[in-house]
Image: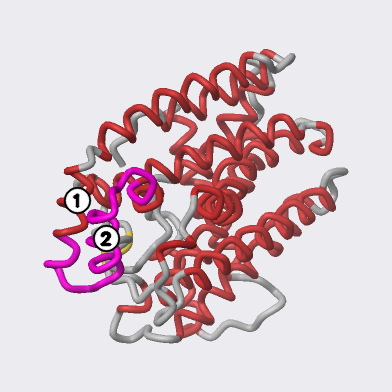
Amino acid sequence: MADLKSKFLEAYAVLKKELLEDPAFEFSDESRQWVDRMLDYNVPGGKLNRGLSVIDSYKLLKEGKELTEEEIFLASALGWCIEWLQAYFLVLDDIMDSSHTRRGQPCWFRLPKVGMIAANDGVLLRNHIPRILKNHFRGKPYYVDLLDLFNEVEFQTASGQMIDLITTIQGEKDLSKYTLSLHRRIVQYKTAYYSFYLPVACALLMAGEDIEKHTDVKHVLVEMGTYFQVQDDYLDCFGNPETIGKIGTDIEDFKCSWLVVKALEICNGEQKKLLEENYGKPDPQNVAKVKALYHEINLQGVFAEYESKSYEKLTTSIEAHPSKAVQAVLKSFLGKIYKRQK
């Protein structure tokens, strides 16, 4: 896998060079340097899980056949398109959330010379995706399917982000609307489609499969994405900021987190009152009270139980799939996220 990761990183350099020499735009030295720095700061900095899993999945779908250099490069290019999509979402998301850190460094818009230029950088990142697809996939029979796939998943993600944002409108802080079904809808659209379904759908298209015939795979991956986000919600509160690379702010931000939804289910009247008085307030004392309540009602235990039940359920769904190759893809995904700490 280490070899595939280095090939993946080499593909980034190739794709970046192509974008910085795109004939559709006449770059000045200054604008080329800006995009170069913007890409290096925002695209390759994360864990690269989404991108790498395209190669990983494609390799498993080919059932042990040795991949050609071209196949590795094309799978890498699709993986990078997902990383570009992720960068575009995160750059804009950080502005919307007034975040301070991302991946252990200041958010892009927080840099002194960047500020709100970051909004246009987000738009640029999004526009790099069809440029990459055109450069490398235009002659492929699945080109239109790829464009459709990226467009649809982007629409689903932006719509999920919208539900998330309008649910947390300042001045309308009403915890009673926070339910498991709302949490699930936000998570499914905002995270699961682009983080879990998209990489596998890309690999399936490259392998010549009709993704319309794989709705069962989509279903399992969306379930997995839901489980992944619940872990994220848990780590936001109970994870080590050093390990996860960011300081969690879900409590201050009045987020519809799995933890608060579960807490509302478990709490007695008095505890619910305490939650309502302290949730969504920026003061560290309020946050500390919410965290103390989470400990008091043993949310860690509730999460541990959820984690093992989800794992069992997902494993059962995966093993019901007729294709051993597809099973291998899904199991590899599950193995990467089960009991993760970051």
Res. 83 in view: yes
Q: In this view, does 12 lie to the left or right of 217?
A: left
Disc on res. 293? 1
Q: Are marks 1 and 2 in contact (CB under 8 Å)?
A: yes
In the orientation shown, which residue stands out farthest toward the front?
269
Image height of 141 relative to 318, above or below = below
Locate the N terminus by quadrant: top left
Disc on res. 275? 2
The magenta stretch spans which residues? 263-288
Main secondary structure type of the part rendered in magenta: helix
Residue 281 is covered by the magenta coloring: yes
Tell me residue 319's x, y (percent): 62, 14
Residue 1 is covered by the magenta coloring: no
Image height of 106 relative to 46, above or below = below
**Secondary structure state at the residue bearing disc 2:** helix
Q: Which amino acid type is marked by label 2?
A: Leu
Image height of 215 relative to 118, above or below = above
Q: Choose the circle earlier in sequence order: 1 or 2.
A: 2
Residue at 40% in and 70% down: 94
Residue at 81% in and 54% down: 138
Tell me residue 316's x, y (percent): 58, 16
Density class for disc 2 (Cα within 10 Å; few <14, some 14-19, many ≥20) is many
Q: Which amino acid type is marked by label 1?
A: Leu
Disc on res. 74? none
Image height of 318 relative to 174, above or below = above
Q: Is residue 309 left or right of residue 282?
A: right
Q: Nearer the viewer, residue 217 or 44?
A: 217
Q: Is residue 43 left or right of residue 19?
A: left
